[in-house]
Image (spheres, helix red, strand yellow):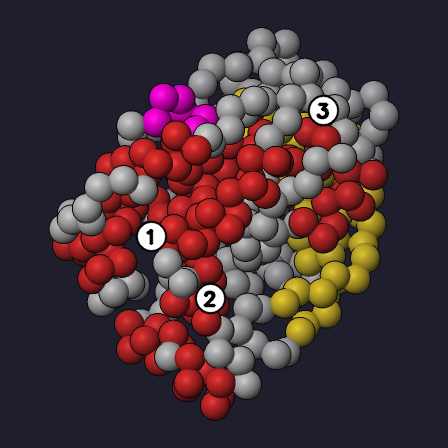
């Protein structure tokens, strides 16, 4: 059995992906993971032989999907690694914009070199693997594994003596090089690539732009949980900046604002006629509530059920663990599905 590699993604469903996929109907052959994030659910579905289409509005999440879901065989070789890490670090986009913002100046120059070199790789799948591994390295060097701390706090938490005095852990991995972390995780990412003999695909778009053009037996919805730690652009948008060499902007339809969350969900549910089965993940600490979501879903189907289980969330950098109920809403769409041809086109970046 192939193994999903370490991705470090807040809200990742890695621990409950098997439980979710166990609920899928036996007659389902295709899955659209509309908010794919770190791709743990898509990866489990791919392992089970489903044809999987992923989507995420963050570009780095598209690359994770392109590397692990769409990609069937491309691996990073020794020659590729030599290309990525050859040459002299230089002052480029990351140095100009993020020195002493998230990383030290020399580290930013290294990132500028690696970004330039990744473009020399001979396939899009290899580039996506490289971006995914650089992301993993960037996250490992960042306290709390997210890019929303100020520089003074980052410097403080990367001080191993301070970390030991405060938390009884030195966290030396924050000060290992990008190359160290890249190489440490290389085999796990390469070994995670496999062919399930399906035409899997990856998209990088606002989900509302795809609901009329992508069809599948199942749509799995795992949007940001409104009212919780759900600012994914704030957590990981820096990696998109690294990839695009420009400062990206927060996206709309982000499920962060409580004032429009119900409207967004209602609009989303109203556009799912391409899918026979709908699966929605949510929890009891989020807004809207379970009853409010059931009310919205019942507007579009008379066949709605919700199952739940306890799920432990570990917030990186804190000792406290919060136990919540994880909900899985399951809808059978009784309306006729649109006869729309599946779109296998490569996502445009």
SS under mark 2? helix
Q: Is residue 170 left or right of residue 298?
A: left
**Residue 50 - label:** 3
Q: Residues within 10 Å of mark 1 (few under 14, many from 20)?
A: many
Q: In the picture shown, does residue 290 fall above or below 50?
A: below
Q: Evaluate whether residue 326 shows in this view.
A: yes
- Foreground tag (2 vs 3): 2
Q: In the picture shown, does residue 271 fall above or below 252?
A: above
Q: Which residue sits at x=52%, y=48%?
A: 185
Q: Which residue sits at x=80%, y=33%?
A: 24
Q: CA distance from mark 1 to mark 3?
A: 32 Å
For this rendering, which residue is in front, 91 or 213?
91
Q: In the picture shown, does residue 72 fall above or below 298?
A: above
Quarter of the image that includes the N terminus: top right
Q: Residues within 10 Å of mark 3 (few under 14, many from 20)?
A: many
Sequence order check, earlier mark of 1 and 3: 3
- The residue to which callout 1 is attached is 238
Q: Is residue 162 left or right of residue 96?
A: right
- What segment carries the magenta color? 121-126
């Amino acid at each position: 059995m192939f193994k999903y590699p370490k991705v470090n993604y807040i809200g990742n469903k890695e621990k409950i992906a098997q439980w979710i996929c166990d609920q899928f109907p036996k007659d389902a052959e295709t899955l659209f993971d509309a908010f794919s994030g770190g791709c743990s659910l898509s990866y489990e579905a791919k392992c089970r032989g489903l044809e999987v289409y992923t989507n995420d509005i963050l570009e780095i999440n598209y690359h994770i999907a392109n590397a692990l879901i769409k990609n069937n065989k491309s691996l990073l070789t020794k020659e590729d690694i030599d290309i990525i890490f050859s040459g002299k670090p230089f002052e480029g986009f990351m140095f100009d914009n993020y020195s002493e913002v998230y990383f030290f100046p020399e580290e930013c120059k290294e990132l500028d070199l690696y970004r330039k070199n990744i473009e020399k790789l001979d396939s899009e799948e290899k580039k996506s693997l490289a971006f995914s591994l650089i992301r993993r390295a960037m996250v490992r060097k960042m306290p709390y594994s997210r890019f929303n701390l100020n520089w003074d706090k980052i410097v403080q938490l990367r001080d191993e003596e301070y970390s030991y005095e405060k938390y009884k852990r030195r966290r030396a991995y924050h000060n290992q090089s990008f190359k160290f972390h890249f190489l440490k995780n290389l085999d796990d990412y390469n070994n995670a690539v496999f062919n399930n003999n399906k035409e899997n695909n990856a998209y990088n778009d606002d989900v509302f732009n795809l609901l009329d053009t992508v069809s599948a037996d199942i749509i799995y919805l795992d949007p940001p949980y409104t009212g919780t730690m759900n600012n994914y652009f704030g957590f990981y948008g820096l990696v998109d900046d690294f990839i695009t060499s420009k400062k990206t902007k927060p996206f709309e339809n982000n499920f962060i604002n409580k004032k429009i969350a119900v409207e967004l969900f209602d609009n989303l549910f109203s556009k799912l006629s391409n899918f026979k089965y709908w699966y929605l993940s949510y929890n009891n600490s989020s807004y809207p509530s379970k009853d409010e979501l059931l009310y919205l879903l019942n507007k579009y189907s008379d066949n709605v059920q919700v199952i739940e289980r306890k799920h432990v969330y570990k917030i990186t950098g804190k000792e406290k663990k919060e136990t919540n109920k994880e909900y899985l809403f399951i809808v059978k769409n009784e309306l006729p599905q649109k006869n729309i041809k599946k779109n296998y086109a490569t996502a445009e970046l």
